[in-house]
Image (cartoon, grey):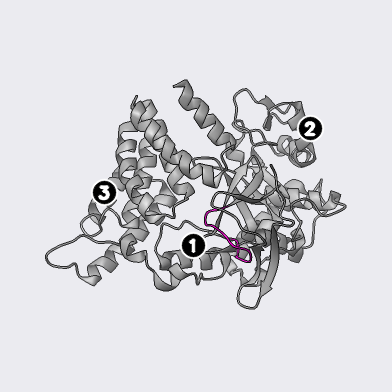
Amino acid sequence: TNKTARGRIERFDSLEKGRGLRVTRPFKVGELLFSCPAFSYVLSVRERGFYCEFCFTRKENLARCGKCKKAFYCNAKCQKGDWSNHKLECSAMNAFGDHWCPSDLTRLVARILNKKKMQKERSASEVILPVQDMQSHVEDEDNEKREMTEVDIAALYRFYGKHLEMPDKSCSFCIFQQVSCNGFTIEDDELSHMGTAVYPDMALINHSCLPSVIVTYKGSTAEVRAVQDMKPGEELLITYIDLLYPTDDRNIRLRESYYFCCDCQECKYKSMDKAKLKVQKRSDPIEPDIINNMLRYAKKTIREFRAFKSLLEMCEHSLEHMGGVFADTNVYMLHMMYQAMGVCLCLTDPYGAVRYGEKIIKLYSQLYPPYSLNVSSLYLKLGRLYMTLDRKTAALSIFKKAMAIMEVTHGKDHLYLTKLRKELTQR
């Protein structure tokens, strides 16, 4: 049952943390605190043809828009429901052809502007916070980010100028920054990116590396569930970043993307950093300079991999080189193993993917919090690989582990779990 934020959570303001949300009654692990429809959302261009643009259902034989031939829907009802947004793009995609290339961020901003123009009262996603009151951090934007925003603003004017009343430049910067800082990535059960959305009420949830709640999705609707038992007055805290990495790395990412550093207990005491940065045990301890040089190499290799999408040889060479200093549990080793697993999947090498996946999952379950989507998504990947290799007993065991996490993070009646149970009974 969908439950709004009203009467279950409340906003608070403090000198230390600014704005936030806290619960007004107790919640148990796995219990739904509230669900929030998107104020506005957009399916990633890369996923067109695989998911319905309106309800985000993944299915075969989706119906194509008769005008632009590029948007896909479950049926006429979904197409009609999406028309107020799709009409912003339909004729423009035909007119610009291959030159139509706004970013997903620009597309989402266009939809927000369109909805604000039509809106007469606050929506169900603004029970606590109106969309225009979301934090923007315009004053914190550096020159590089400002230049990137200018490119997106130019695309907004170019591709949507005929259908929208454009705000002035300073307002445009503010809106783009609001969406950049407060947008949520809608992901599937394996954490693949499906789209981006804005949920004003959820924009008030602060970050912690020791989160009390988790966000998952049903279509474009976000659901917030407890991953700790919560007492009245306790704050809702989610993680904005991947928690696998050590404290300094996490805070660099937070500063770059969200303009703050975390002061949670984990960041203060760094209790997991030793395990995350473990090195090989030797009779002669490895010199600190060698460890620091290897850390620099690891970070440089990860950046290069992201930039150039190098293949398996690069992963294996890097793992061999780093393995001379780092233990397998070191998060930089884990990161490169995960990349290697992904490359094996692209190369249709399930045996290689399983080999890496089995190494990673043992360590993920030690380093991530108990109810982690990173862990459940890897269980699912491995389970499906086991099925491909006809290892049904192993698949069943690992699917059960994924389901135990997802029953807390998604709720027992979520479509992903229903499909998984059905899939298992059919096999």
**Which residue sits furthest right?**
120
Q: Find out whether the residues at labels 3 and 2 contact each other: C-beta distance under 8 Å.
A: no
Residue 210's label in the rendered image is 1
Which quarter shows the C terminus?
Answer: top left
Query: Pointer 2: residues within 10 angstroms few (<14), some, or many (20+)?
Result: few
The residue stretch that appears in magenta: 226-236
124 horizontally vs 389: left or right: right
Residue lying at the far left in this picture: please name it: 283
Label 2 secondary element: helix
Q: Check disc 1 and report its element: helix, strand or loop.
A: loop
Which amino acid type corresponds to the residue marked 2 in the rendered image? Lys
**One can see residue 229 in this view:** yes
| Marks 3 and 2, the one that precedes in the sequence | 2
* Residue 363 position within the rendered picture, expressed as x and y whole percent measured from the top left: 33, 51
Mark before the other along the chain sequence, 1 or 3: 1
Gap between marks 2 and 1 measured at Cα:
42 Å
Q: Quadrant of residue 287?
A: bottom left
Q: Quadrant of residue 121?
A: bottom right
Q: Is residue 346 visible?
A: no
Q: From the image, which quarter does the N terminus lie in? A: top right
- Which of pointers 3 and 2 indicates the residue nearer the eye? 2
User: Tag 3: residue type?
Assistant: His
Q: Which residue is disc 3 drawn over?
A: 317
Provide the secondary structure element on which disc 3 rests: helix
Vertical placement of 67 versus 233: above or below? above
**In the image, what residue type sits under mark 1?**
Leu
Image depth: mark 2 or mark 1 in front: 1
Residue at 59% over, 62% down: 231
Q: Image height check: is 217 above or below 255?
A: above
Q: Residue 80 shows which numbered tag?
A: 2
Mark toward the start of the polypeptide (2 vs 1): 2
Residue at (46% x, 70% y) in the render: 265
